[in-house]
Image (cartoon, helix red, strand yellow):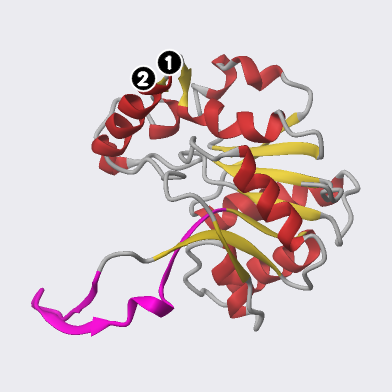
Amino acid sequence: MNQTLPAFWAVIPAAGVGARMAADRPKQYLQLGGQTILEHSLDCFLDHPRVKGVVVSVAADDPYWPGLRCASDTRIQRAEGGRERAGSVLNALLLLHAQGAADNDWVLVHDAARPNLARSDLDRLLAELADDPVGGLLAVPARDTLKRADANGRVSATIDRSTVWQAYTPQMFRLGALHRALADSLVADVAITDESSAIEWAGQAPRLIEGRSDNIKVTRPEDLEWLRQRWAKRG
């Protein structure tokens, strides 16, 4: 891309346990291609020339983070993870604010267990949203027929998939706006599942930037196996 991409901070909420993986450790610390999933998720940002710094939110008693090579990288700071994702992200934003980051700075929040982010997708997000008044997120249009279920597990309706997108990360918003939206939503006890939902709750409409469908989040064992097979074919 010819245009100058905006500088940004990256925030990685990594305090979850990933119970659906049924593993002996949180899923972000499982191995993939010689590194942990979390290290791969960080790499795309650490390799980017416009990154100003990275904050990783981990549990206070996390025994795995200190053992990673990247834990000593001076560009990475550690924040304490919250009970939920919103708390982890908010703690990271508070740390950035305390160290002098400006309200108008861009912040990209990325899932700790989304290790297959392509540099081209990251650059597209930065380029498309550089001057956007709200911000936005990587997303993928729904491909399959979608059904709404009733309380008995039966189909109650077929949803028009042309208006439905799967939300991915990174999600890119101004530091001050995201801080306020998350803090206010937590006080109001609103269910916030990602940063976009906080911004939406605050009355804004984030922009959807179409990304690659292989930027998957590792949630179940088959996701990790799919990535292992895909990466093996690369080599």
The residue shown at (82%, 39%) is: 50
Establish if 46 lies above or below 100: above
Name the amino acid type tagged 1: Gly
Q: Which residue was labeled with disc 2?
A: 232
Question: Relative to the observer, which residue lies in front, 179 or 225?
Answer: 225
Q: Is residue 61 visible?
A: no
Q: Are marks 2 and 1 in contact (CB under 8 Å)?
A: yes
> Residue 141 placed where, x, y %?
43, 66
Q: Is residue 146 left or right of residue 150?
A: right
Q: Is residue 214 left or right of residue 121?
A: left
| Secondary element at tag 2 | helix
Identify the image quadrant of the C terminus.
top left
Name the amino acid type tagged 2: Ala
Establish if 143 lies above or below 17: below
Mark 1 surroundings within 10 Å by alpha-carbon count, few (fewer than 14), some (14 through 19), many (20 or more): few
Q: Is 173 inside the magenta-drawn segment? A: no
The residue shown at (13%, 80%) is: 155
Establish if 76 lies above or below 103: above
Q: Quadrant of residue 18?
A: top left
Q: What's drawn in magenta, residue-wise?
A: 145-169
Q: Which residue was labeled with disc 1?
A: 235
